[in-house]
Image (cartoon, helix red, strand yellow):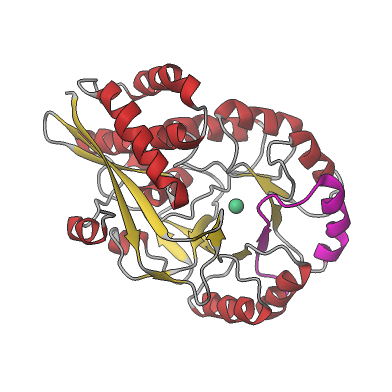
Amino acid sequence: MTIVQAQAIPIKLPYDIGGPKPTFAGIPRQMEILFIRIETDTGLIGWGEAFGLSIWPATRQAFEHLVAPLIMGKDEKDISNLMANLQKQLHILGRTGAVTFALSGLDIALWDIQGKAKQQSLSELLGGAKHQSLPGYASLMRYGNTDLIKHNTERALEKGFTAIKLHEQSSEYVQAARQLMGPELPLMMDVNCPWSVAQTLEMLPQLQASNLLWLEEPIWPPEDFRGLKKIRDKKSIAIAAGENNISTCHFEEMLAYGSVDFAQPSVTKIGGITEMLKIMDLCQHFETPVMPHSPYFGPGLLATLHLAAILQPETMIEYSFADLGANPLGDCILMRQGRIDIPSGPGLGCDPDLDILHEFRVP
Ligand SMILES: [Mg+2]
């Protein structure tokens, strides 16, 4: 079989987070998903997701102008060689960013096709799911307001979540959530790289009262693995990072330094399922738990579910705390009482609703 069609389909969904929407690079956050659709000459269709947010127009360009022409007529079953060759062919144009996001979407779609061709779910292809469902944690966007943080922490608890991550940068905000949650439930703080090593060390005593399961990406720049190690060496709070690593080699470096307690590879950013599997092997070697980065509502979330399903012990799934005005993957990506089922159908286990893709497609 060969690849005969490759499309990038951006959609923008209405959504509500129980407060004002945060901004990325000054642009109000939209719920954009960049679907990747690959079709073979035998009519099999695979779906992937390339990292979206405000970068999706660049990722779409990279996919349509760089990636798609290189894959026409190629054997879609030969995923690892095809992806390795594409990485080499395109490396001058970006080892991360739009090019690598586009490749990630392609890789996910190719694995979806592989599963459909063999009538096996992705986790079956990867050796079999160890879990039928996994716990999710509510990943709250940034509110920067104590009342809104309390309100939405309460809403998350009411919906059955038993773990919550805040994207806030102040100890008062996490303490407000901790008071509502009680002392035991897992609470995490993701600050998105604002501080120097010295500033982070100053923050640690203030954060300790909140009994955080982890502090995520405290320092700038995120690839300062030696700096992260200095924070971790204080043994005050566990450290998580990895969503901004640019390659599998980067993960190896981070893990070898011993910079983190939890590694957070992101399937739509790092090169798809092929690279995630290599990173998961590295994490096993370095005895570091994988906590996948997955604030997605598209095939990126499905791929993450299957990957997480083959891990022991049970890992948590990052789940964006947002009510969608439309949901192209329907029940397959719904959290119920804080848990989410691993889809059992072939490939990713769930194709998008084409009517919803059509209705919310960005013109
Ligand atoms: Mg994060």
Q: Give the range drawn in magenta.
A: 182-208
Residue at image location 69% in from the left, 33% down from the top: 254
| Residue 153 sits above or below residue 94 on the image | below
Residue 71 in the image, given as x and y percentages of width and height: 27, 24
Count of numbered labels shown in the rendering? 0
On screen, residue 42 versus residue 65, left or right, reads left
Residue 138 in the image, given as x and y percentages of width and height: 53, 65
| Residue 267 sits above or below residue 41 on the image | below
Residue at image location 52% in from the left, 27% down from the top: 95
Decide whether residue 160 is among the magenta residues. Answer: no
Residue at image location 37% in from the left, 50% down from the top: 302
On screen, residue 163 versus residue 266, left or right, reads right
Residue 59 in the image, given as x and y percentages of width and height: 40, 39
Residue 115 in the image, given as x and y percentages of width and height: 27, 37
On screen, residue 89 versus residue 153, left or right, reads left
Decide whether residue 201 is among the magenta residues. Answer: yes
Q: Kindly tell me whether residue 126 is visible in this rendering.
A: no
Q: Kindly tell me whether residue 177 is visible in this rendering.
A: yes
Q: Nearer the viewer, residue 307 or 75?
A: 75
Residue at image location 37% in from the left, 65% down from the top: 334
| Residue 284 sits above or below residue 306 on the image | above
* Residue lying furthest left: 42
Q: Which image quarter holds the N terminus?
A: top left
Quadrant of the image occupied by residue 174: bottom right
